[in-house]
Amino acid sequence: MDLEQEGLSDSDLNIARRSASAYQTEMPELNRAGDDTAVDRALIARWTSGDQRAASALVERHAPSLARFVASLGVLSQPEEMVQDTFVRAFASLVSFRGESSLRSWLFTIARRLVLDQRRSSRRDKLHVSIEDAQDQLVSANDVLDGVVADESETRVRDAVARLSPMQREVFTLRVVEGLSYKEIADVASTTEGSARVHYHNAMRAVKEFLDA
Amino acid sequence: MHDMNRDTLRDRLPDLLHGRLAATDAAELQRAIHADAELSAEYAVLRSVLAAHRAAPAIDISRIVSALPPASSMTAPEVDELAARREAKRPWISTRFARAAALLAMVGGGTMFSVISNRSQIDPLPTAVAPVESLATRGAAMELGLGASTDDLSVEQLRALEADIRSLDGLPSVEPESGTDLFDVESAS
C-alpha cells in the first residue's frame, strides 16, 4: 500500500516501517503529540502490507483500554476473552477499515456489541453478569485488577463510579478514564453527543455527591 | 478559550487530563482551574477517578496476537485495488438511489395529479346507492355521481331516478341506532 496516499507524514511513514518494539519506543512522544490516529493508520497500513509485528503493536496499544472498558460493562470474569474476540473480529475486517472513525472508538464499538451479544445469549442460564445487574458486583471488581493495591480512597472512588447507572458509568468511564471525545462516545454507545454530555455531567455530579457524603 | 464559560471549561477537563488540548488551551484551562475552587475540585475528582481506574485487568498480549489472522495476505496492489473498488462502488450506489428516488417521485407525482384532478370533478358520492334496475337509471345515477346536473336528463331518466330515490328510503341506516350495543348478545336477543 502506498502510505503517502493515505495522507501520512514522513514521520508516520518512518514509524510504520519499524518493528513493533520500535513502535512502542515511539509511542510516548506520539501520544503526547495527539497523533494516535496517525499511528494507528500507519500500523494498519503496515499490517495490510504483511507486517505481523504491526498487529502486536496495535494490540499492545489498545488491549488495556479495551480490557478496562469491558470490565466496566460488567464482564468481570475473563475479560481477556472478550478483548481477544474484539481483536479477532476487528482484524478480520481491518483491510476494509475506512478510518471514518478512530480505530480506538471502532474497537470499543465492537467490544460493546460483543458484550451485549454475550449478555443476551447468557441471560437464560444467568451465568454472566448483565450490565444492568453489575453495579453491586462492580464494587468488588478490584479483584479483577491484578497488581493493584487500592487504598481506601481509591476504593471509595471506584464505589462511586460503580454506583452510577449503566449508561452514566459507560459514558463517564469512556470520557474520564479513556479520554474519548463526546463524538467518539456517541459512536461507541449508540447515542448522541448531547446525550453523552448530559450523562457525563449527571455522572460527575453523582460521583461528587458520593465522595462528599 | 477566553470566552469559554464554566460549563465549557468543565467539559474540557477530561481533555486536559489526557493531554488532548493544544498548549495554549491547556495553559488557559490550568489558569482557570487555579482561579476557580469549584473547577479545581472537579479536576481533582477526575484525577482520582483516573488513578483509581487506570489499572487494567491482566491481559496476555501474546495470546491475543496468536489468535489473530495472519498479516494480510493481500499484496499492496490488491489492497489498493480493493480500496479503488470500494470507492468506485459508492457513486454507483448513489446513482442507483437517485434513479429510484426519481422514479418514485414521477410515479407518486403522477398518481397525486390524477387523484387531485379527479377529485376536482367529483361531488361527494352518496354513501348508499339503491340497486340499479335499469340502464337508464344507472346512467342517470352515474351522471349525477359525476357531478352533472339534472337539466340534461330526459323525462324517463328523471322518473327512473325518482323511483330510485324513493327506494332508498327503505335502506337500513349505515350507523347502528344509538343505545344498541352490537356486542351485547343477550340484550340484542
Image (tube, rainbow, N blue to C red):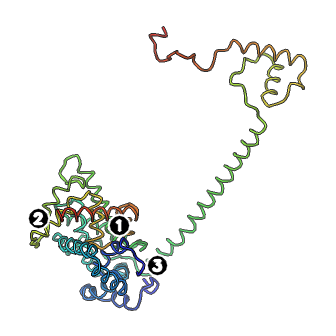
Foreground residue among A107 and B62: A107
Foreground residue among A168 and B101: A168
The location of residue B22, given as percent across then percent down, is 37, 84
Please, which chain is the residue tagged with disc 3 on?
B
| Callout 3: SS | helix
Q: Are marks 2 and 1 in contact (CB under 8 Å)?
A: no
Residue B10 sits in quarter = bottom left
| Foreground: disc 2 or disc 3 | 2
Please, which chain is the residue tagged with disc 1 on?
A
Give the mark nearer the N terminus: 2 vs 1. Answer: 2
Q: CA distance from mark 2 to mark 1?
A: 27 Å
| Kind of residue at disc 1 | Ile
Residue A143's disc is 2
Q: Residues within 10 Å of mark 2 (few under 14, many from 20)?
A: few
Q: Residue furthest top?
A: B189
Query: Residue at 40% of width from left, 62% of height from top?
Result: A192
| Kind of residue at disc 3 | Asp
Q: Are marks 2 and 3 on the same chain?
A: no
Residue B134 sits in quarter = top right
Query: Residue at 47% of width from left, 75% of height from top?
Result: B83
Q: CA distance from mark 2 to mark 3?
A: 47 Å
Residue B80's disc is 3
Above or below, comparing residue A201 to residue B44 in the picture: above
Q: Are marks 2 and 1 on the same chain?
A: yes
Q: Are marks 2 and 3 in contact (CB under 8 Å)?
A: no
| Kind of residue at disc 2 | Asp
Query: Residue at 54% of width from left, 72% of height from top?
Result: B88
| Callout 2: SS | helix
**Which image quarter holds the N terminus of chain B?**
bottom left
Question: Would you name the residue on which mark 1 appears?
Answer: A185
The location of residue A179, given as percent across then percent down, is 30, 73
